[in-house]
Amino acid sequence: MIGEQITVTTSPTLLVNALTTSHVNYPESLILYVPSNGATVFIGGSTVTTSGFGLIAGAALAIDIVNDAVYGTVAANTQVVHVLRRF
């Protein structure tokens, strides 16, 4: 497992790259967490906006993706997102 803290900005910020060809047939398991004193982070693809899927402060999201990149954005300022992933 790989754990990271990524600072999300008001522009789409890459949280997780699409898998490399050596892992393309395996789902990438992710857990995304926004600290309880944080701002809502909107999750989606490279064109994510603040009208997308909102991950509120104190919330976590567990998802499996296959060969997709995941981005986040915030409405204002910046916000740290904790990411736990397999590859």
Image (cartoon, grey):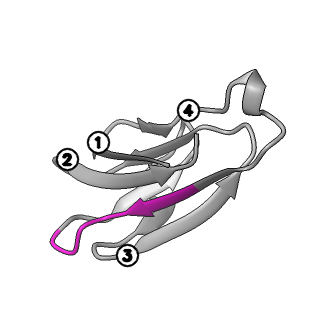
Quarter assignment of residue 46: top right
Q: First in sequence: mark 4 or mark 2?
A: 4
Q: Amino acid at mark 1?
A: Thr
Give the residue displayed 84% in from the left and 39% down from the top: 25
Q: Please state the extent of the stretch shown in magenta in the rendering.
A: 30-37
SS under mark 1:
loop
Residue at 78% across, 44% down: 26
Q: Which residue is mark 4?
A: 17
Would residue 5 appear left or right of 16 to someone viewing this image? left
Indicate which disc residue 78 carries.
Answer: 2
Looking at the rendered structure, the number of numbered marks drawn on it comes to: 4
Q: Marks 4/1: CA distance?
A: 19 Å
Q: Which mark is residue 28?
A: none
* Placement of 34 over or under 1, stated as above or below: below
Crowding around mark 4 (Cα neighbors within 10 Å: few <14, some 14 to 19, many 20+) is few
How many other residues sit within 10 Å of disc 2, few (<14), some (14-19) or many (≥20)? some
